[in-house]
Amino acid sequence: MGHEVWTFSDYIMLVVSGVLVNNILLIRFLGNCPFLGVSKKMDTAVGMTFGVIFVLTCTGPITWFVEHYLLERFDIVYLETLAFILTIAVFVQLVEMVIKKVSPGLYRGLGIYLPLITTNCCILGTCFYNIRFKFGFMPTVVFSFASALGFGLALIIMAGIRERFHYARIPKCFQDTSIGLITAGLIGLSFFVFAGLAK
Amino acid sequence: MREIVKLIVVLTAFCVGSAFSLAFVKEATKERIEYQKLKVLVAPAVKAVFPSYDNDPILERVKVKLSEKEVINVFPAKKAGSLIGIAYEGIGSGHGGAVEVLVGMDLNGKILGIKVVKHGETPGIGTKAVESQEFLNQFKGKGVGSKLTVGGDIEAVSGATETSTAITEAVRKAVEMFPKLKEKVRG
Amino acid sequence: MEGSRLVKEFTKGLWKEIPPFRFVLGLCPTLACTTAVRDGIGMGLCLTFVLVCSNVLISLLRKVIPAQVRIACFIVVVATFVIIVELVTQAYFYPLYMALGIFIPLIVVNCIPLGRAEAFASKNTVIYSLADGLGMGLGYTCSLTALAIFREIFGKGTFLYHHIMWSGFEPFAFLQKPPGAFVCLGLMLGIMNLIGSGEK
């Protein structure tokens, strides 16, 4: 999946692949824990989406730098897991401090999601994929953004559907998480329609 | 102030402890991990280049230092405990980058078999040479002293000249290394 | 009296608070690593190892870790054990390592080790933390294995990579694909809730 020269249409295909064909959440299974917790209401879903898009688009390239200019330079690539999670945690901590100071309003709306995002597997997972797929710098940025977009898309669709569950009569044992998972599966099935659009 | 110092000391202690234990485990598992990776990458090729053997060439691999930075893995094939041949990689430059070829040699410097292990050649065009058993079999029996060039002892696959040349180059370079490597493995 | 508390902490992870069914944590590997029984068991055991080790270490050091940086310390501890597991599986269980892929390093952000560190190990003694980690880890392994058994037998027709179904059997490939994982887990969760509510 990593090739030497990237044309504009390659980037478009990368976005299509990240958002639809290989949706990070429904197909790649990353980001499920917050997914079920936060998708019950539309406004929490939207808040989480913005948080993930911001954090992932930044930490994707940052961890790319850490890998190529730090870990490879000193031949400590096996510490990748540790280095990446610390980078992400530090970044999120800094962002939280900045937002708190600069815009208390934004902090009230978005700030509570930030610690949750640190342990969101889709952030760390996408950072790993950037390395596994041997992406250069620009593709890393685009892929990180596309994955976050895909996460947000799945989340918002889910929230839209789950808000309507209030009006449905669901058997008690299937309520909440159970029906959420089944719904996620059916949404994922509909995403299969996109398979073949891109690699 | 004391609070902050305590925080920094504790965090640093954790990081140092972590780094030490990880470095230790890494050293302890290094050989084994290399073995596993080679098994996946190279084992089928080793099977293909030696007619028969009864040891584990990858487990018994010998690391030979070619120069300051270059170390090469030599895989010895044995029958009933005695060495019958060695396999190692030669590299040629092809259309899509390096072409790595595993060459199996017997102890007299004759090629037992070759197999392309890694390449970036164009599917359908260059890969014709990579996959053609006819082309690859040409190398069997040749060795030290043969004219390992396209046009010399080797005939290229038509339509895949560049790749054929790259493979031939890789084999030629491997054969050139043979005397030195045989010494190191035998000795 | 101590003995019975020990048993209680151990067994709660095996049914009453079993992840990921009752404690909805650690969903990502549950969905991704259960296409085959070997992978499910492997993943569960890797997580159990990390969980037990980090619980024990964090419990040992709980008096020393300052509250403000505790999350960072927990992360360093968990990540260290995760890397150890990564290296060991690479060295001795290479096919499993290839199958689980990035989900081994992703154990570091799996809510179970960090969650138990915060909720339990940092506040309890070593022996109870050990029991808690072992119970939760084994419970998780059982959940993964149960799901994997279902998905492998009906989705692929094999068990531990040996064909066991009759030759005309058409595997229900849906179960092997991502949507199938979600639906399967959701149904299993629903059934468990049903059984659970029956108990009350």
Image (cartoon, grey):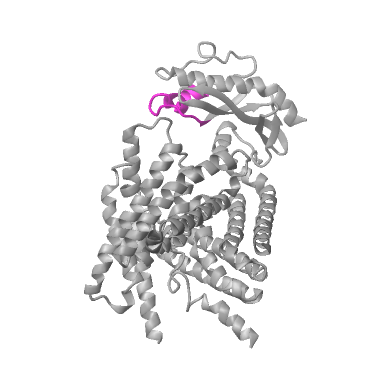
Residue located farthest toward the right when viewing the structure as drawn: B187
Q: Is residue B61 above or below residue B132?
A: below
Q: Is residue C48 left or right of residue B7?
A: left
Asked if residue C169 shows in the view, the reply is no
Q: Looking at the picture, how far across and down is residue C63, in whole percent?
A: 66, 71
Q: Nearer the viewer, residue B74 or B114?
A: B74
Q: Is residue C42 left or right of residue A18?
A: right
Res B17 → quadrant = bottom right
What residue lies at 35% left-to-right and 68% top-to-bottom? C186
Res B105 → quadrant = top right
What residue lies at 62% left-to-right and 55% top-to-bottom? C84
Q: Is residue A45 above or below residue A124?
A: below
Q: Looking at the picture, how far across and down is residue B57, in whole percent?
A: 65, 38
Q: Which residues are magenta?
A: B117-138
Q: Nearer the viewer, residue B176 or A93?
A: A93
What residue lies at 34% left-to-right and 35% top-to-bottom? A10
Which quadrant would the N terminus of chain C be assigned to in this image?
A: bottom right
Asked if residue A130 shows in the view, the reply is yes
Q: Is residue C102 above or below residue A11?
A: below
Is A122 contained in the magenta span? no
Q: Is residue B151 left or right of residue B180?
A: left
Q: Looking at the picture, how far across and down is residue A148, in whole percent?
A: 37, 51
Residue located farthest toward the top when viewing the structure as drawn: B151
Is B120 contained in the magenta span? yes
Q: Looking at the picture, how far across and down is residue C95, in whole percent?
A: 53, 50
Q: Is residue C172 above or below residue A64?
A: below
What residue lies at 52% left-to-right and 68% top-to-bottom? C115
Which quadrant would the C terminus of chain C be assigned to in this image?
A: bottom left
